Image (cartoon, grey):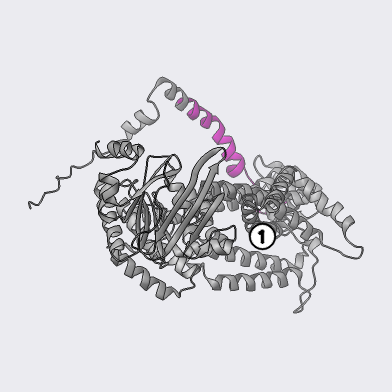
């Protein structure tokens, strides 16, 4: 099998670099020789069948999971066991989770202000102003003083995106951001993500939303059984897939 | 676009029912239920009058010599009238009882204020500091013309309340640290926490109190004296901390993993993650268990009698030991039982109120 193409094309220098990254859960080889470079401002969509390792890969990028072999460099910082470096990478990456993971005991505004105040030592007033600006941007400013459980799923996920943005990250990681949402709420979240992409944010999205992948992604990464099978532009990926595994996957998700 | 009218709401069926209906459905709904109801009524019919007679109608309510009580059929509350100061203040010098009384009122006032959430501000800490200082001055004396009273003479309810309050105030943060330690990634911290918790939980409090009183001094350099009150206090803290640690650990495990991941992905370090995200959620989930531990600690302080500290329990036993009033021990124990009950009930009520108040994030 030929090595998938790994160069970031038509983009600046790589801001995320994964080189021969391997990870095991006990005996289970969950990531196999992952090579991937993401350029600054590039939008990557990662897809693949469940259990293919795509969430594990994106979680390795900000060290929520530890990789056991290989190299991960994020915005010039190589991830090692050094906690300082891990913290640095986490400050550079915002992350949005499938289950939103908002803090239920804090109001929406407090959810947004917590990290700027505690990590960046931003004065509260300034942090709240920034938070309100981002809440307006995800069109949810009027909910600022509610608690997460009082919001719909779509609203919660938009709050989660705003929360990540408040830390002013260089990169946004999305781990299946719409998979836990009711169908009528998916669009409001995707709209926010499209807006982010248009502003030039570097994004890595694990998602099954093929419409989003087609219209927003610069490149699509297809993973199966812990390895990257194919990387290509949406055009190549949807219309001229190189591998049989990709064709099988596409036929399964596009013809249901 | 057409405007869709909301469907007209219909009223929910009334769930109020009449007295007869209530009786029929709640008390006589089946043969078994009817038998139970009748049996209960019968039991109360026979049990209540003697109880009421002993407590109230045949009791000696006013101050009276023991002979009057012996003649009476019911309870001898005259005994409480006679002995209440000994029971409540123990062996503290009789003429100075006003001092522990004020100290106790200050303590109860501070606790009362602390249960009121709008008071949870910096000033409350200052109030506690000042209050504890006032209490120390009152209890020990030795300055401002107050005679010095050593801790071996402290006793009764003030002693019980001090042991409980200090015990809980120190054991709670200690227990939280132990719970975090038990979940730590660092093997040494984790092992130490587990060994501590299992060791302390594995022995009765009495044995800890004995060790604190009799063995601990053997390890101390000669000349170093630590009062038996302090040693008992430390034993209570060590003991309560181990139990609280396990209660808090239950809460820690109930906080979803995603909460920590979200906090970490935002760049929060270990302590801010625990302090701002995990502990607030963990602790409010285990409030019933925590209060349960507090109540146990309160009642467990009665065991300090074993190392000759005259807490409320021992004070009552000593009061009952007076030969003249020996026949009326039950009244003494009912009296302190009532005091324990009141405090425990208040703690229980407070925990329920706190649960409702802290539930804001979960309400729709």
Could you say where residue B221 lies in the image, as x and y percent from the top left?
A: 90, 62
Q: Residue at 33%, 62% (x, y): give it.
A: A10
Could you say where residue A222 lies in the image, as x and y percent from the top left?
A: 37, 45
Q: Residue at 49%, 65% (x, y): give it.
A: A76
Q: Is residue B323 left or right of residue A155?
A: right
Q: Is residue B95 left or right of residue A140?
A: right
Span shown in magenta? B38-65
In the image, farthest residue toward the left:
B2
How many labels sit on residues? 1
Provide the chain ID for the residue under circle 1: B
Taking depth in this image into account, of B238 and B110 the one nearest to the observer is B238
User: Is residue A68 in the magenta section?
Assistant: no
Around disc 1, counting alpha carbons within 10 Å, would you say few (fewer than 14), some (14 to 19), or many (20 or more)?
some
Report whether residue B319 is seen. no
Seen in the picture, residue A229 relative to A127 is either above or below; the reply is above
Seen in the picture, residue B242 relative to A253 is either above or below; the reply is below
Taking depth in this image into account, of B157 and A183 the one nearest to the observer is A183
Could you say where residue B257 lies in the image, as x and y percent from the top left?
A: 49, 49
Could you say where residue B360 lies in the image, as x and y percent from the top left?
A: 41, 56
For numbered disc 1, what is the local secondary structure? helix
Report whether residue B39 is seen. yes
User: Is residue B51 in the magenta section?
Assistant: yes
Label 1 sits on residue: B170
């Amino acid at each position: 099998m030929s090595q998938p193409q790994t160069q970031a094309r038509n983009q600046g220098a790589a801001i995320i670099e994964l080189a021969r990254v391997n990870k095991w859960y006990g005996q289970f080889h969950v990531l196999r020789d992952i090579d991937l470079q993401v350029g600054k401002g590039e939008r990557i969509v990662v897809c693949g069948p469940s259990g293919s390792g795509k969430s594990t890969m994106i979680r390795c990028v900000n060290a929520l999971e530890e990789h056991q072999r290989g190299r991960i460099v994020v915005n010039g910082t190589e991830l090692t066991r050094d906690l300082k470096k891990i913290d640095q990478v986490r400050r550079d990456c915002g992350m949005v989770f499938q289950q939103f993971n908002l803090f239920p005991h804090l109001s929406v505004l407090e959810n947004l202000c917590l990290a700027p105040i505690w990590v960046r030592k931003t004065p509260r007033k300034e942090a709240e102003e920034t938070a309100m600006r981002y809440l307006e941007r995800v069109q949810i400013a009027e909910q600022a003083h509610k608690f997460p459980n009082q919001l719909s799923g779509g609203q919660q996920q938009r709050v989660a995106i705003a929360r990540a943005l408040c830390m002013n990250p260089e990169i946004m990681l999305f781990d299946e951001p719409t998979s836990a949402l009711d169908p009528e709420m998916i669009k409001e979240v995707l709209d926010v993500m499209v807006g982010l992409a248009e502003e030039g944010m570097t994004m890595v999205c694990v998602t099954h939303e093929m419409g989003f992948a087609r219209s927003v992604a610069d490149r699509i990464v297809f993973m199966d059984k812990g390895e990257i099978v194919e990387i290509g532009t949406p055009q190549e990926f949807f219309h001229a897939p190189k591998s049989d595994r990709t064709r099988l996957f596409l036929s399964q998700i596009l013809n249901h | 676009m057409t405007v869709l009218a909301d469907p007209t709401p219909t009223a929910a069926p009334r769930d109020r029912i009449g007295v007869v209906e209530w009786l029929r459905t709640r008390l006589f709904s089946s043969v078994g239920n009817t038998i139970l109801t009748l049996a209960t009524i019968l039991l109360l019919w026979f049990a209540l009058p003697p109880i009421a007679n002993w407590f109230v109608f045949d009791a000696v309510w006013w101050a009276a010599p023991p002979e009057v009580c012996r003649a009476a059929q019911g309870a001898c509350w005259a005994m409480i009238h006679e002995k209440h100061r000994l029971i409540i203040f123990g062996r503290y010098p009789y003429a100075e009882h006003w001092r522990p009384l004020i100290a106790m009122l200050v303590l109860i006032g501070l606790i009362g204020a602390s249960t009121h959430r709008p008071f949870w501000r910096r000033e409350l800490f200052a109030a506690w500091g000042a209050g504890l200082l006032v209490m120390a001055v009152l209890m020990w004396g030795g300055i401002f013309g107050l005679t010095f009273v050593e801790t071996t003479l402290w006793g009764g309810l003030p002693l019980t309340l001090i042991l409980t309050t200090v015990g809980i105030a120190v054991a709670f943060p200690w227990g939280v640290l132990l719970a975090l330690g038990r979940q730590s990634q660092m093997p040494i911290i984790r092992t130490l926490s587990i060994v501590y918790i299992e060791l302390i939980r594995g022995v009765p409090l009495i044995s800890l109190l004995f060790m604190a009183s009799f063995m601990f001094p053997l390890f101390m350099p000669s000349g170093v004296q630590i009062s038996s009150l302090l040693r008992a206090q430390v034993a209570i803290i060590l003991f309560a901390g181990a139990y609280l640690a396990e209660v808090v650990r239950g809460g820690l495990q109930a906080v979803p993993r995603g909460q920590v991941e979200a906090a970490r992905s935002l760049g929060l370090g270990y302590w801010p993650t625990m302090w701002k995200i995990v502990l607030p959620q963990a602790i409010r989930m285990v409030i019933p268990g925590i209060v349960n531990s507090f109540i146990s600690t309160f009642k467990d302080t009665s065991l300090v009698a074993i190392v000759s500290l005259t807490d409320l329990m021992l004070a009552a036993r000593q009061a009952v030991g007076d030969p003249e009033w020996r026949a009326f021990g039950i009244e003494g124990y009912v009296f302190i039982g009532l005091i324990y009950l009141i405090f425990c009930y208040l703690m229980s009520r407070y925990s329920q109120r706190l649960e409702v108040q802290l539930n804001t994030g979960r309400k729709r």
